[in-house]
Amino acid sequence: MSTLRQFEPLALPCMEAAFNLAFWLVRSRADAEDIVQEAYLRAFRAFDGFRGGDMRPWLLAIVRNTAYRWLSNRRRSGTVISLEEAFADGSGQSADDIASDEPTAEERLIGAAERDYVLRALAELPPAFREVLVLREIEGFAYRKIAEVTGVPVGTVMSRLSRGRGELRKVLTRLMGKDEPNAM
Amino acid sequence: MQCERVRELLSPYLDGELSAEERRAVAAHLGECRGCSAQLSDFRRVGQTLAEAGPEPVPKALTARVRSNLARVAHAEPTPISALIQKPLAGASSVRRGVLRQAAVIAAACVLSAVATWLATSNLAQQHRLEQDVLAAHVRSLLQDSPIQVASSDAHTVKPWFAGRIDFSPEVKDLASEGFPLVGGRLDYVGGRRVGAVVYKRRLHVVNVFMWPSASAGDVAPRLMTRNGYNLLTWSRGGVDYWAASDLNAGDLAQLQALL
């Protein structure tokens, strides 16, 4: 109980980042929920090994491992969820949902459409690029922390981000069509 | 610097992860190369779009689910046996009797402590399950739009509502003048059975009082415990088990108990 009291105040504030990483790795809200629950139990059992400081990289590394284990199980069982399904299962990220929450100014609509394209393009990238982009662009992690989460050297983080951004730009250009010459 | 080399450095340049020297070289190149600076602005724009989209929203009930899992695991952790048998061991060695006798004492102590542990944990496990159920029911009621199914500050509306819904008539009192206005009642599921929940308020705090017919006839004095930051108070009176759950302080909770 006493360790739970120490664990919760450190771990619960990481929930948003944990769920976000899990979601982007498995691209399903329902599966991400299961992964986060399992990861928190694993983290609690491994709490002795936490050396203090910022808990996010330590906890996210566990979330990531749990998600990858889950992904490899799914691959073995042969079920593959399509991108359309991943976005249809209530991710709340469709252009319609976002636009409905916001003022109807044309600018906002264009922004929402662009956001939809960017999120779709991100979902198409291989997980190794997806995870570094999520940690960098959404969570704002420094390279050193991304290296802690993914368990690779900082140099590898740097090159993956560099290639990931290039790939993202390519996919976006394809998604947005050739009729827009200056597509991102 | 060549474009090819600069393109490799654009991403760390954007993230502020280059050395001062590299940064200067990239900046100088960007000033005169439109292709590279267009790529940089694309990277920046996509990054901003992702940052604005923000993290995927966390499902409402996830935190509660994670916490209840953790509480279950924390309670289920077995007490290390070494901690349980140390005391009898120390007592036996100080007596300084024969080796065989000492061994017999130790063996007896082990058996005794094992039996005591088994008795204590099976009782405790049951108790823990009940506490977890009460806590979960309380937290669940707070997560929903309304903690009640029948809303009334009138005890004569709430009490009859329970008739036919549960197999006994729960205690419902209007304690507004004592500072515990009645909010209403609902049915809940605790300890594997359907129970009545009467909801009171104290200032902004919600108090759930769960009730069900007691398994034993005797009255039991109130016992207070704190779980996950919530106070739980349990007592038995007149053949009914009561569990009150709230984030209210222990003193106020005890006051409510005395009024019921």
Image: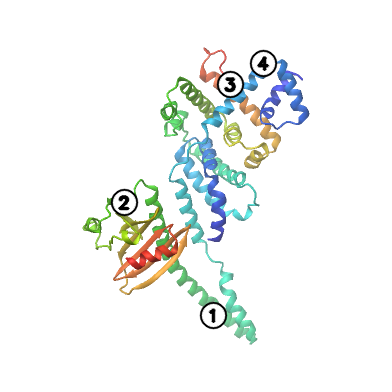
Residue type highlighted by circle 1 = Ala
Mark 2 vs mark 3, foreground winner is: 2
Find residue B9 and report its horizontal and vertical position in percent.
71, 26
Q: Is residue A134 above or below residue B241?
A: above
- Residue picked out by circle 1: B108
Mark 2 vs mark 4, foreground winner is: 2
Q: Residue sitting at 43 percent across and 46 percent down?
A: B61
Q: What is the CA distance from the residue labelled 1 to the residue labelled 4? A: 84 Å
Task: Left or right? Give the position of B149 relative to B68.
Answer: left
- Residue picked out by circle 4: B35
Task: Left or right? Give the position of A52 relative to B228.
Answer: right
Mark 3 vs mark 1, foreground winner is: 3
Q: Is residue B49 something one can see in this rendering? A: yes
Question: Which numbered dot is residue A170?
Answer: 3
Q: Residue sitting at 56 percent across and 79 percent down?
A: B107
Residue type highlighted by circle 2 = Ile
Residue type highlighted by circle 3 = Lys
Establish whether labels 2 and 3 are both on one chain. no
Q: What is the CA distance from the residue labelled 2 to the residue labelled 3? A: 54 Å
Q: What is the CA distance from the residue labelled 3 to the residue labelled 1? A: 75 Å
User: Label 3 lies in what chain?
Assistant: A
Residue closest to the eye, B168 or B229: B229
Establish whether labels 3 and 4 are both on one chain. no
Do callouts 3 and 4 mark residues in contact (Cβ within 8 Å)? Answer: no
Q: Secondary structure at mark 4?
A: helix
Q: What is the CA distance from the residue labelled 3 to the residue labelled 4? A: 15 Å
Looking at the image, the residue that sits furthest to the right is B21
